[in-house]
Every structure is written in structure tokens, then in C-alpha cells.
Amino acid sequence: MSCSSPPQTKSPPPEKVEPCTAIAPLLSPLERLDKGELPSSVQTRAKSIFEKYDRDGDGVLDGDEFGALLHDFGLDLNSAAYREAIEVVASPGARGLGFEDFASLLAHETRKNCGYSPDGVLELRRLFRLFDKNSSGMLEPAEYSRLLQDIGCAPRSKEDSMKLASLMSSCRADGQLGPLTFDEFTRLFAGLAYEDPNLMQQVRMINALSCIPAAS
């Protein structure tokens, strides 16, 4: 008596996930800055500043309004200089800056400095040295894994790990995972902090706690 095998049912094909879609949320922060896009937190602040100095509410910062903004932020230029600046940012012959031009200007400066003031860079350097346990000038995988855990950015799922790995490899010159120099770490942190303006506060807290002597 022969036993017939039960009919085989075909399992549905695995759902196809486009790689670029899966990693986009963390892979492209610096690319978005290159295109003139600002982090949401910076965008909100920029809009508030723009509206404050757009005194006539026409949606354009004219020469006098832009000059007042630069003056209040510590940059004194004569009228010819800030009118020339408007033309450089917008287009030749432009008499003012729309919000998109203003946002692109801020994005350029944010991208150039990875979004950090000199004080911010100093905080990141202190954090880098704190976790560079062997003083090699590089963060090895074990070192940056502990750092990411301490600042609350450790991956919690396979998808998170994929996104983080993609972001980290995009920060390195060779596009591969490996140890991070300080500049590469700064780029990584800029990506992580793109939508989380509170991440730097966590860095400052860790740095401050590291200065407290251990109890004897």
C-alpha cells in the first residue's frame, strides 16, 4: 500500500522591500541638506525668524529687512553688501529673499558645519574621546556600539540595524562599515540628530557626568 504525499501548498512569495525605501529615513539627512531641505526643528525656527523680520508681511525679506536680520545676529554690513548677498543667494537682480531662498541659505550653513556651532563640535569631540578607550583616534565597532547605546540610539530591530548600518557606511569615505574617525562620527551624529534636536542635550549630560569623580 502506497502512501500518497499530501498536496503541497505554495507559500506566498516574500514581500519585496525596496532597499532605498527601507534605509531612506536615516540614509539621506545630509543629502536632504544638500538639496536645501532643513530638519523639521530648524525649519520651524527658520520660519519664525523669517516672519519676524518680514515686517510688511509680503513673504520676502527686502534689503532693509535682511540687513536688520544680519545686524541682530551680529553681522554688520552696509546696504550695498547685503543687497549683493541677496543676489548671490537668490539670483542676479533679486531685490529680496523668499523663504525658500532663506531656507536654502541656512541649509548650506548647516550642511557645511554638520549643523553644529563651535561649542557643539567641542561637545562631540569630548564624547568621542570619552568612548575612544584605546586612544586610537578612531571609534572601533565595540566603542561606537556602546556610545550609541548610551545616547539612546542603539537599534532595537533588524530594520533599525539595517538603517543604522546604511547611515554609518555612508559616513565613511570607502562606503563600508568600520572604525569611525572624528569627522565621520560627526557626520553620523548629524544624521541621527536630523530629526531629534534633543540628542545634543544627551551628549552634554554624558559629558557632564563623566567629569564627576567616582565615589571612593
Image (cartoon, rainbow, N blue to C red):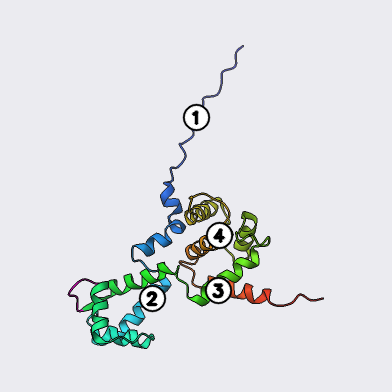
* Few, some or many residues within 10 Å of mark 1 (<14, 14–19, 20+): few
Please state which amino acid type lies under the numbered disc 4: Thr
Q: What residue range appears in magenta?
A: 90-95
Question: Which residue position holds label 4?
Answer: 181
Disc with the residue nearer the chain's start (2 vs 1): 1
Q: Looking at the magenta stretch, what is its main secondary structure?
A: loop
Q: Quadrant of residue 94?
A: bottom left
Residue 204, percent from left and from top: 59, 75
Residue at image coords 64%, 62%: 132
Is residue 52 or residue 183 the one in the foreground? Answer: 183
Q: Which residue is mark 2?
A: 44
Q: CA distance from mark 4 to mark 2?
A: 32 Å
Q: Between tags 4 and 2, which lies in front?
A: 4
Residue under circle 3? Answer: 122
Going by the numbered disc 1, the residue's amino acid type is Thr
Is residue 54 visible to the viewer in this orientation of the structure?
no
Position of 183 relative to 96 (above/below): above
Q: Is residue 28 magenta?
A: no
Whole-Å distance between the Cαs marked 2 and 1? 54 Å
Instruction: Let me know if residue 94 is in the magenta part.
Output: yes
Residue found 36% across the figure and 85% down from its top? 75
Quadrant placement of the N terminus? top right
Tag 3 secondary structure:
helix
The residue labelled by disc 1 is 9
